[in-house]
Image (spheres, rainbow, N blue to C red):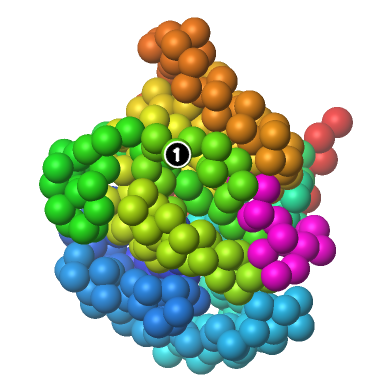
């Protein structure tokens, strides 16, 4: 009797997470023993955040379902309502698709909604990038909650593997596969500086910074207060161009977005703001940047593979594993200026030549796909808490 292909349902809700999932989606799509189901949600379906579902479809993926869940509010109540809408939407989608495994990545509230629905539907969950720390944002609690809802765990370092086990997950269900971002760099066809300049309509053949800043959701900054020290610091480097990428749909994102747009208008000759560069564009931009500046996880996970220095601001990424390419600074204008000057200094840059990424060998996808295709599913839902003695 021929066994039917396993149905592997992958959820994506943001441009950054989709960039990490791209090659895994390609492998799942082409695997003879698996059927890929793709559910698109969150920022992908919002024109405010670039309607990036169009990029997904242009890449050759046809979503099996779309869960529209974002309410037009960036308040804490608005985010909580979005989670509720997402859980309702995913409940119906999962009932329709009946996947054998749900695959989710990371720690965003959209993914939290999907995991809750799958847990109630008794669908095994495979979680990528668990065990990490981001102590300045609600993602920290969401990530660990998803770990406890999940049954298979694909982590990026041995330290993260140990932490998932510490949370009570059985060691034989936790695999250190490395970071998908490292594989994305290894497999991507990156653009030249001239090609990227032409693609975005902004000249980056001259020195530039790649800047991304997201809300620090456990802080109470409003109206763009959190990003103002960064924008003030960038004023101190008039000879550098600045490529600003879009903010996430987190609590208090509107004020940050408006402050960034205002800054870009004020300095239109040397600043370019875009909601999304796409995976190829973003990695290409990172490759040639003098410095990556902001508080995005990509500055810690992907940038070390390019040996590009990162000035990491504030608490958003506090607790993550770091390469020696990362300079941590407080969210203070003077500290950010000092951090950028250090990153530009010949002495610091000389230290980066032999950087080795702590996030694996760039071969994560094959490991994840093999486990999804072969690991027994019949007893996954019954978990015993693994006590670390």
Residue 229 magenta: yes
Q: Residue at x 14, y 42 (%)?
A: 194
Please name whichever residue, 55 or 47, is drawn nearer the observer in this view of the structure.
Answer: 47
Find residue 312 and report its horizontal and vertical position in percent. Answer: 60, 37
Does residue 345 appear anywhere in the picture?
Answer: yes
Find residue 309 and report its horizontal and vertical position in percent. Answer: 47, 27
* In the rendered image, the vertical position of residue 362 relative to residue 108, given as above or below: above
* In the rendered image, the vertical position of residue 95 relative to residue 329, given as above or below: below
Q: Residues within 10 Å of mark 1 (few under 14, many from 20)?
A: few
Residue 142 magenta: no
Q: Looking at the figure, which quarter contains the N terminus? A: bottom left
Q: Residue at x 39, y 37 (%)?
A: 240
Please name whichever residue, 151 or 178, is drawn nearer the observer in this view of the structure.
Answer: 178
Q: Residue furthest right?
A: 389
Q: Which residues are magenta?
A: 217-230
Find residue 334 and report its horizontal and vertical position in percent. Answer: 70, 34
Q: Residue at x 86, y 31 (%)?
A: 389
Find residue 52 and report its horizontal and vertical position in percent. Answer: 34, 72
Is 204 placed left or right of 60 in the picture?
Answer: right
Q: Which residue is mark 1?
A: 238
Q: Residue at x 64, y 70 (%)?
A: 255
Assign a secondary structure to mark 1.
Answer: loop
Does residue 100 appear anywhere in the picture?
Answer: no
Quarter of the view holding residue 51: bottom left
* In the rendered image, the vertical position of residue 313 relative to residue 22, given as above or below: above
């Amino acid at each position: 009797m021929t066994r039917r292909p396993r149905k592997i349902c992958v959820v994506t809700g943001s441009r950054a997470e989709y960039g990490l999932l791209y090659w895994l989606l390609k492998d799942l799509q082409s695997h003879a023993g698996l059927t890929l189901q793709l559910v698109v949600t969150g920022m992908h379906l919002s024109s405010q955040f670039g309607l990036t579902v169009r990029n997904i479809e242009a890449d050759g993926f046809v979503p099996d379902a779309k869960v529209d869940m974002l309410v037009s509010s960036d308040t804490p109540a608005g985010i909580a309502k979005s989670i509720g809408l997402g859980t309702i939407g995913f409940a119906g989608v999962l009932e329709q698709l009946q996947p054998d495994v749900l695959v989710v990545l990371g720690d965003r509230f959209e993914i939290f909604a999907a995991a809750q629905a799958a847990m109630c539907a008794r669908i095994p969950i495979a979680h990528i990038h668990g065990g990490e720390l981001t102590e300045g944002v609600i993602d920290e609690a969401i990530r660990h909650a998803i770990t406890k809802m999940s049954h298979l765990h694909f982590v990026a370092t041995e330290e993260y593997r140990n932490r998932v086990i510490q949370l009570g997950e059985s060691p034989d269900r936790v695999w250190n596969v490395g970071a998908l971002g490292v594989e994305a760099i290894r497999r991507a066809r990156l653009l030249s500086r001239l090609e990227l300049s032409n693609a975005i309509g902004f000249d980056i053949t001259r020195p530039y910074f790649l800047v991304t800043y997201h809300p620090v959701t456990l802080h109470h900054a409003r109206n763009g207060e959190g990003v103002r020290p960064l924008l003030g610091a960038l004023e101190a480097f008039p000879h550098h161009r600045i490529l600003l990428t879009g903010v996430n749909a987190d609590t208090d994102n509107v004020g940050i977005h408006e402050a960034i747009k205002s800054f870009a208008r004020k300095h239109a000759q040397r600043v370019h703001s875009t909601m999304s560069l796409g995976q190829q564009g973003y990695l290409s931009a990172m490759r040639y940047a003098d410095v990556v500046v902001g508080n995005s996880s990509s500055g810690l996970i992907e940038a070390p593979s390019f040996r590009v220095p990162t000035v990491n601001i504030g608490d958003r990424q506090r607790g993550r594993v770091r390469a020696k390419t990362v300079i941590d600074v407080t969210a203070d204008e003077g500290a950010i200026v000092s951090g950028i000057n250090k990153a530009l200094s010949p002495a610091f840059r000389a230290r980066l030549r032999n950087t080795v990424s702590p996030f694996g060998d760039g071969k994560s996808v094959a490991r994840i796909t093999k486990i999804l295709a072969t690991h027994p599913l019949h007893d996954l839902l019954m978990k015993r808490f693994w006590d670390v003695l």
